[in-house]
Image (spheres, helix red, strand yellow):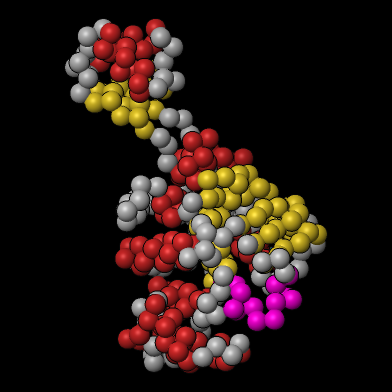
Amino acid sequence: MIEAENLTKRYGDKTAVDDLSFTVVPGRVTGFLGPNGAGKSTTMRLLLGLDRPHRGDARINGVHYRDLPEPMRVVGALLEARAVHTGRSAYNHLLCLAQTQGIGRKRLDEVIELVGLTGVARKRAGGFSLGMGQRLGIAAALLGDPAVLILDEPVNGLDPEGIVWIRTLMQRLAAEGRTVFVSSHLMNEMAVTADHLIVIGRGRLIADCSTEEFIERSTEKTVAVRSPDAERLAGIVAAEGGKADPSGDGLLTVTHMEAARVGELAAAEGIVLHELTPRRGSLEQAFMELTRESVEYGRTEAPAAEPAAPAPEGGSR
Ligand SMILES: Nc1ncnc2c1ncn2[C@@H]1O[C@H](COP(=O)(O)OP(=O)(O)OP(=O)(O)O)[C@@H](O)[C@H]1O
């Protein structure tokens, strides 16, 4: 469990984290979202005792990070600005870390295998690609078999296969009962990875709820209706308080009315439907909507398009 209580951190006259309180519970993946400069990395640094808050408190499993006797066995972390500029091999890099906490070579081999670096473990880590460096960072985070994981942008630099791999790994770690707290700016990815979201803007809490609820709350639901008699149906929907926008080819986008009601009205009037699909907004839309006020640099254009995340295995989130 991770607990942040009234966390506040200032840099000069800039308040990076502003009276932030939240709890991250075990057994699910909790996504940490916020526009650039919202304070995500600062919050993670505060949780990990790498920075001192001006006010408030951060605890991991009830204890301040600095008071953990063997921190790597309790919390594993991957920080965004990690960069392994080392002449050491990946194996030796992990071995040094393991030795500081009395972690054996068996576990070392396990994590190297787990992150898929077995073939390159003896190669110089400094020459690794961004994606391989990311895997090495994740291996380091997992070394102590910790119950809590704090991962800052773990999918950064990973290819699509790597992204699915880290998603599956995070979900598995959470299913094992661990606390998994992960920041990302890839909304589609978070939508299929995280069960719960903590969203911040300008250092303040904006939302702390399930991913479903976040999308539900912040985007308008629509219904896609296709009918050879779209024009007449649009009039009927409008007369009943809905709004139907035609977009050609017999397609209407209906708002302010549930799909069931549209179907009932069509049936009552003997209007044939070729499609009736409830649609909900995307996490990206919800995020843009909720954080509009708190984008730090007054950005007005949409963020760079993100490739759609493939559906998770065996899930529909
Ligand atoms: N060491 C520092 N000195 C001065 N200002 C800082 C420092 N670290 C962070 N900040 C400022 O604090 C605010 C929060 O930064 P932080 O890196 O925590 O945000 P973030 O949500 O992680 O952003 P991003 O998504 O861009 O990584 C920003 O305005 C940033 O410029």
Q: Is residue 197 above or below residue 150?
A: above
Is residue 226 visible from the viewing direction of this image? Answer: yes
Front-lying residue, 114 or 120: 114
Query: Which residue is rendered at x = 67% and y = 67% of the image?
Result: 60
Picture quadrant where residue 189 is located: bottom left
Picture quadrant where residue 229 is located: top left
- Is 195 positioned to the left or the right of 5 in the image? left
Q: Is residue 74 magenta?
A: yes
Query: Which residue is rendered at x = 31% and y = 66% of the image?
Result: 161
Is residue 11 visible from the viewing direction of this image? Answer: no
Where is the N terminus found, in terms of image quarters? bottom right
Q: Is residue 111 above or below residue 75?
A: below
Total labels: the figure holds 0
Residue 309 place in picture, x, y as percent: 35, 53
Query: Which residue is rendered at x = 66% and y = 66% of the image?
Result: 61
Query: Which residue is rendered at x = 70% and y = 81% of the image?
Result: 69
Front-lying residue, 251 or 72: 72
- Is 107 positioned to the left or the right of 58 in the image? left
Residue 80 place in picture, x, y as percent: 54, 68
Q: Is residue 251 magenta?
A: no
Residue 115 place in picture, x, y as percent: 40, 76
Picture quadrant where residue 40 is located: bottom right
Q: Which residues are magenta?
A: 64-77
Residue 89 place in picture, x, y as percent: 44, 91
